[in-house]
Structures are given as structure tokens and as C-alpha cells.
Image: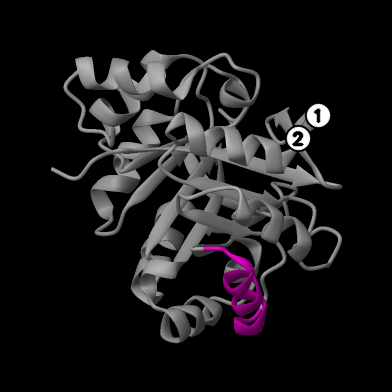
Amino acid sequence: MLAKRIIPCLDVKDGRTVKGVNFVDLRDAGDPVELAWQYSRQGADELVFLDIAATQENRKTTLDLVKAVAQQINIPFTIGGGINAVKDAELLLNAGADKVSINSAAVRNPELIDELAKAFGKQFVVVAVDTRASDGQNFVYLSGGNIKTTIETENWVLEAQERGAGEILLTSMDYDGTKAGFDNVLLKKINDSLQIPLIASGGAGKQQDFVDVFQQANVDAALAASVFHYGEILIPELKETLQREGIAIRS
């Protein structure tokens, strides 16, 4: 059985880590370089670093910040934000990233997934998907959750997989920042249709939420932000809880 992964997410805007509720009302959560160092020492399995304003502001992820974060950690590091071409990803990988995450750009130009997978290998490509329910269906949203599409979420993740995504990072916007637990019903439905790893995002509020998402949706990894940033959940304690519940995790 493959070990489940615990992944803190650093949403960065203007050089600071931020966190909101349902993608709005952002508040400061600390210095991303310091947080990255802390999480690496605490036993996080990976980190995800998202420059959440890069796409909206039509610019690239800040390379200096990427390099600074990468120098502080010894765990896999995924970087996303403003990646629109192979050369953008190459710069980030050269700056210290282990994987790149693409979201809006992949929806607007699906062939970008193919190009990245061909250039670097599937294991380097994470396709992030922001989803929200509407009239009993789930649809993909773009630009930090600001633009609704007519693309059904399940159809899109299957296309991303077919084109060469190595992982799917699925964020339920309805649950994001609520601390009410992950969207386990949707996550299970999506996970059952995939043959590549699924990372759950959106809704973590307590340790039991991680237990539930692994047991009920059988996802490969669970990602959270504010509960880690503000010390509400400590990663070593979370891993002890998961082990007691019989969930395979990395020590």
C-alpha cells in the first residue's frame, strides 16, 4: 500500500502567504520561506507553492521567492502560477521546483499538458482544478475561482489524465477555508474514475477530516493551508493520529 501524503499549501500574494474562505477575504499567514522551512522540519511529505495572483495579474511566478523557498527544504516542492508555456515551467524547475502545477492555462490550452509531459515527464506535471457545484453538477473555475466555465469537472480531470497529467490537485471551492471537512463525496467520485494520484484540497479543519478523506475517498494525498499556518493542526500529531487509524503514512 502506498503511503498517504500530507501537503501544506502556501498561497502567496505580494511575497506573503495568505489564506481566505471560499477563495476570498484573504488574510496574512506569514512568510513563505519561513513556513516552508518549518514544514520541512515538521515532517510534511511535500509542499505546494501557488502564486495565486500571477494568472490574474498576467505575470510569471516570482523566481527569487521560488529559489529562496527551495533552498530551505529537502522535500518535494510543487510550484504553480502564471505557467503558460514549456519555457515557464523550465525556469521554475531550474529554480528548484520538483513539479509544476498548471490550472487556468491548461483549461485554456489543453495541449499545454501534453507539451509539459513530453518535455519533462508526467511525474513533473500536476493539473490543479478548482471546482464548484451548480444545479447538481460540478464545474471548473478559472483565474483563482473568479471565472466559471461550462466544463464539467469529472470530464476535465479525465482529459487531463489522458493528456499526460501525473497528478490531479482538486480544490472544492464550496469547502475551501470553511474547516467543515473535505468534499469526500465528490473526491471519491473523481478518484474512482482516475488512474493517477488525486490530491484533496479544501475544507480541512481538524485531524478527523484527514482521517475521513483517506478512509472515505481513498485519495493519495490531502492538502491544507490555514490549519497548518496558524498551528491549529501540527503535522507530527496528525501523522500519529493517522497511524493509529491504520492509515499508511510516511514517518
Q: Main secondary structure of the magenta part?
A: helix
Q: Is residue 139 left or right of residue 168?
A: right
At label 2, counting other C-alpha atoms closer than 10 Å, the crowd grade (few under 14, some 14-19, many 20 or more) is many
Q: Residue at x 64, y 81 (%)?
A: 85
Comparing 216 with 148, the one in front is 216
Q: Which residue range is magenta in the image?
A: 85-97
Comparing 154 with 171, the one in front is 171
Q: Is residue 125 above or below residue 236?
A: below
Say which amino acid is labelled 2.
Val
Q: Is residue 236 left or right of residue 79?
A: left
- Rounded to the nearest angstrom, the CA distance separating label 1 from label 2 is 5 Å
Q: Is residue 154 above or below residue 226?
A: below
Q: Residue at x 50, y 39 (%)?
A: 40
Comparing 163 with 11, the one in front is 11
Instruction: Name the residue carrying label 1.
Output: 28
Instruction: Name the residue carrying label 2.
Output: 18
Q: Position of residue 139 (x, y in %)?
A: 54, 49
Instruction: Give the position of the C terminus as an image quadrant.
Output: top left
